[in-house]
């Protein structure tokens, strides 16, 4: 490939620039991870990235918990030929919401994922074969146990903050419950103490689409083309609808047709409406980067998540930490509606915890915390919240 | 107002604005558990910048996120006349805290009475500088009216401090005529 045909990236001064994914191995036998299901599992390789510098006092570390299909690459570029920067590049960088001039930011791929951390597509060292569906059942608690061990491995005793949206927000809450002394602040975006029945329903349909794909082969599809591509793409399309709002897709696509101004009056597979074409594109792009088995495991972990069930009540789960909480919801998010954030707020207020809650006006639905247009809004509260957490922490010490 | 809040009490400020009062209570008055409630996002961001915990909520929606007796003292300053349902707001306030401090404007101040009587127009004063059509004040009441409402809700008025010339005073001569507003210290009578 010549430089004329491949556009090259010139990161600007607000970018963390070129970054490298790093790896470390945790829970090596005999010190395996004791999982919530009771099983023991290890070793676990974790893929992670860091941005900014850790202070000599090691007091400026922030951990990002990514959502369902995210990865460790939150910001910057891997190569000059990348099509896109990291998934939260608008929010992480010098002078941005998570200011890498001030903070040491860590993001790691979750256990069970498919972007470098041990998951169903990894090779089981005992058999030399991919785990496939012999991979152990995972929970949000297990994801957080691995993150927590990584943070200790990186020499950070206590994080200034943990932040995450959606499934990432669930991890933040679990972190506050499971490792209450490891964090000074918990920032929970578009999330909840449990997934609603509606959320479980959409996840279930997505899993069925994958499992019913003739190429699923009981999860042993690695090395056999094409694998459950259709099923996974369909799962993504269904899920993608839940991430948007009625309003935003109405504005973006409306009833417009893709290639014509008039109906064709034929049933055909090709997309006729623009929204169909958009969803198909999303599905197609997704299967290039995501593993169907990981999707099964992670959506199930999300379905199982229920703070009240696990700890007796939300209050009981969150009372042991002295972390400050920031809870953010979005007006048009119907997957994790504001009422669910308010449930968290009520429990925290009852316990006399330091909690700030804000509902932002946004037309973009559940994905608002990722959308460039809404990042300024998120920044406006996260920046002063982190400033004050840092000051309060200094006062305490 | 600080004098009426026991040191170290748990305080909730309804309509806290940028959290100024709560910050003072935390930094100078030993109040460790504080919370602001505010509807305006810009004001909320101001409170966050002071390190004051604040939740985004409409007082008219019942303070559902706040458990009964989660606080010792609730503060509501110059806001009661601006909510849609003052009676419910007051009742909810006494639900989340046993004691409350409320500052309400006194629409029976002599200047207001004069304007209405002699100019025949909706009054505009220094303290209540709004034209009728863009006033945030949805309700008008006097000190006498407020006492009535408190009685209806079975709330004990521990103190009534008329605010005359910018100062809360223990006693004033004909307060319902001379006070521009009044600070009430209330307690749930149960």
Image: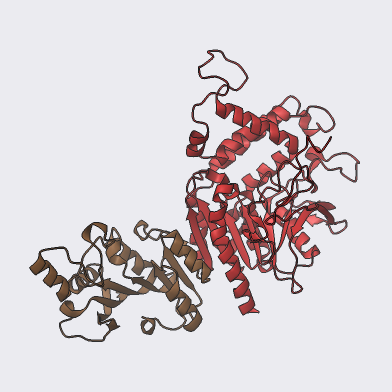
Residue B188's place in the image compared with A364, above or below, is below
Q: Quadrant of residue A272?
A: top right
Question: What residue do we see at 49% from left, 27% from top?
Answer: A255
Determine if residue A350 is in view.
no
Q: Residue B24, position in %: x, y?
A: 46, 79
Give the camera-side residue of A247 and A197: A247
Question: What residue do we see at 57% from left, 24% from top?
Answer: A258
Q: In the current view of this chain or complex, which residue is farthest to the left?
A: B118
Residue B15's place in the image compared with A310, above or below, is below
Q: Residue A19, position in %: x, y?
A: 78, 53
Question: What residue do we see at 50% from left, 43% from top?
Answer: A334
Q: Quadrant of residue B99?
A: bottom left
Drawn side of residue A287 relative to residue B115, left or right: right
Colour representing chain A = red
Give the camera-side residue of B170 and A302: B170
Drawn side of residue B167 relative to residue A349, left or right: left
Q: Which chain is brown?
A: B
Drawn side of residue A310 relative to residue A132, left or right: left
Determine if residue A30 is in view.
yes
Residue B169's place in the image compared with B17, above or below, is below
Quadrant of the drawing holding the C terminus of chain A: bottom right
Q: In the current view of this chain or complex, which residue is farthest to the front?
A: A4
Quadrant of the drawing holding the N terminus of chain A: top right
């Amino acid at each position: 490939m010549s430089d004329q045909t491949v556009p090259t990236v010139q990161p600007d001064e607000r970018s963390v620039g070129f970054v490298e994914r790093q790896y470390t191995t945790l829970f090596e036998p005999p010190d395996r991870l004791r999982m919530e299901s009771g099983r023991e599992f290890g070793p676990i390789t974790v893929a992670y990235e860091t941005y900014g510098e850790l202070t000599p006092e090691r007091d400026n570390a922030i951990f990002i918990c990514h959502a369902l299909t995210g990865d460790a690459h939150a910001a910057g570029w891997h190569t000059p030929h990348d099509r896109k920067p990291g998934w939260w590049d608008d929010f992480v960088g010098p002078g941005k919401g998570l200011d890498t001039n001030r903070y040491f930011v860590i993001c790691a791929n979750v256990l069970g994922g498919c972007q470098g951390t041990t998951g169903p597509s990894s090779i089981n060292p005992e058999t030399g074969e991919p785990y496939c569906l012999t991979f152990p059942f995972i929970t949000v608690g297990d994801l957080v146990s691995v993150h927590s061990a990584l943070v200790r491995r990186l020499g950070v005793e206590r994080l200034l903050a943990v932040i995450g949206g959606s499934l990432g927000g669930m991890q933040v809450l679990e972190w506050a419950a499971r490792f209450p002394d490891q964090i000074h602040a918990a920032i929970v975006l578009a999330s909840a103490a449990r997934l609603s029945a509606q959320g479980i329903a959409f996840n279930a349909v997505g899993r069925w689409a994958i499992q019913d794909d003739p190429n699923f082969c009981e999860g042993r599809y690695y090395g056999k083309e094409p694998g459950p591509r259709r099923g996974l793409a369909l799962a993504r399309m269904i899920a993608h609808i839940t991430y948007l709002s009625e309003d935003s897709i109405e504005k973006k696509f409306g009833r417009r047709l893709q290639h014509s101004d008039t109906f064709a009056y034929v049933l055909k597979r090709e997309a006729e409406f623009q929204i169909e074409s958009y969803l198909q594109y999303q599905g197609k792009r997704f299967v290039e980067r995501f593993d169907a088995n990981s999707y099964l495991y992670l959506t199930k972990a999300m379905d199982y998540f229920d703070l009240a069930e696990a700890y007796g009540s939300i209050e009981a789960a969150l009372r042991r930490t002295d972390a400050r909480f920031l809870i953010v919801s979005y007006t048009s998010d119907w997957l994790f509606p504001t009422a669910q954030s308010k449930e968290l707020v009520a429990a925290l207020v009852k316990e006399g915890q330091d909690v700030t809650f804000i509902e932002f006006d946004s037309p973009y639905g559940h994905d608002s915390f990722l959308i460039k247009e809404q990042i300024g809004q998120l920044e406006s509260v996260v920046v002063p919240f982190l400033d004050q957490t840092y000051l309060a922490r200094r006062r305490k010490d | 107002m600080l004098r009426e809040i026991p040191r170290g009490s748990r305080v909730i400020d309804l309509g806290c604005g940028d959290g100024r009062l709560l910050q003072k209570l935390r930094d100078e008055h030993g109040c460790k558990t504080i919370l602001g409630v505010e509807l305006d996002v810009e004001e909320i961001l101001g409170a966050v910048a002071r390190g004051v915990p604040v939740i985004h909520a409409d007082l008219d929606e019942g303070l559902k996120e706040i458990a009964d007796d989660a606080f010792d003292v609730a503060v509501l300053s110059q806001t009661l006349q601006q909510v849609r349902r003052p009676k419910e707001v007051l009742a909810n306030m006494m639900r989340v805290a046993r004691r409350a401090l409320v500052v309400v404007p006194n629409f029976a101040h002599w200047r207001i009475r004069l304007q209405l009587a002699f100019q025949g127009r909706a009054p505009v004063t220094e303290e209540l500088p709004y034209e009728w059509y863009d006033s945030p004040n949805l309700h008008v009441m006097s000190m006498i009216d407020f006492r009535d409402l408190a009685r209806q809700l079975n709330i004990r008025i521990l103190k009534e401090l008329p605010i005359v010339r910018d100062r809360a005073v223990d006693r004033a001569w004909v307060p319902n005529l001379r006070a521009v507003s009044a600070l009430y210290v209330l307690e749930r009578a149960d």
